[in-house]
Image: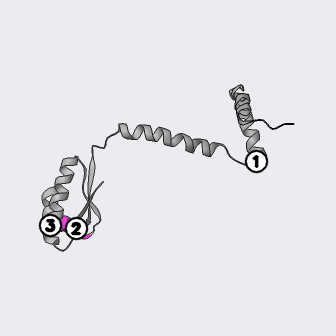
Amino acid sequence: MSALTNEQLLEAIGSKTVLELAELIKMIEEKFDVKAAAPMAMAAMPAGGAAAAPAEEKTEFDVILKEGGAKKIQVIKVVRAVTGLGLKEAKDLVEGAPKAVKEGVTKDEAANIKKQLEENGATVEIK
């Protein structure tokens, strides 16, 4: 028996029905003790994910206080002004960092909050 070329194999596989291909895959899995399902699924995921990602632009952002910094009192004042929290709640948020200061805000509002907090010594991240 002579070895088939890759082109001959592809041509032979291309002429099979879906049922015959499913049977062939099962035979290959048994003979070589492999699982064809996982690699196929992994190969399909990046193509679909890559196509969907650019079409979807993020419109809501979360402002995360990473650290209160040295001027905690000023940072607490900003947190109170931005969130409407009471003094105790704002203090707990700043001292419990990292925590979300505000969630689901626009890009401009998130940038504004970040700027105010950073001006007062806080470390902030926008997600």
Q: Which residue is mark 2?
A: 94
Instruction: Point out the stretch of residues depicted in magenta.
Output: 85-95
Closest to the observer: 104 or 17? 17
**Rendering coords of residue 6 (x, y %):** 71, 36
Residue 41, above or below 90: above
Tell which tag, 3 or 2, sits nearer the viewer: 3
| Residue at figure coordinates x 15%, y 56% from the top left | 82
> Distance of mark 3 from mark 2, alpha carbons?
12 Å
- Residue type indicated by callout 2: Val
Instruction: Determine which quarter of the picture holds residue 117.
Output: bottom left
Q: Is residue 60 above or below residue 126?
A: above
Between 10 and 93, the one nearer to me in the picture: 10
Q: Name the residue beneath numbered marker 1.
A: 32
Q: CA distance from mark 1 to mark 3?
A: 63 Å
Q: Label 1 sits on what residue type? A: Phe
Q: Residue at x 61, y 45 (%)?
A: 39
Q: Position of residue 7 (x, y in %)?
A: 70, 32
**Residue of label 3:** 120
Q: Determine the secondary structure under disc 1.
A: helix
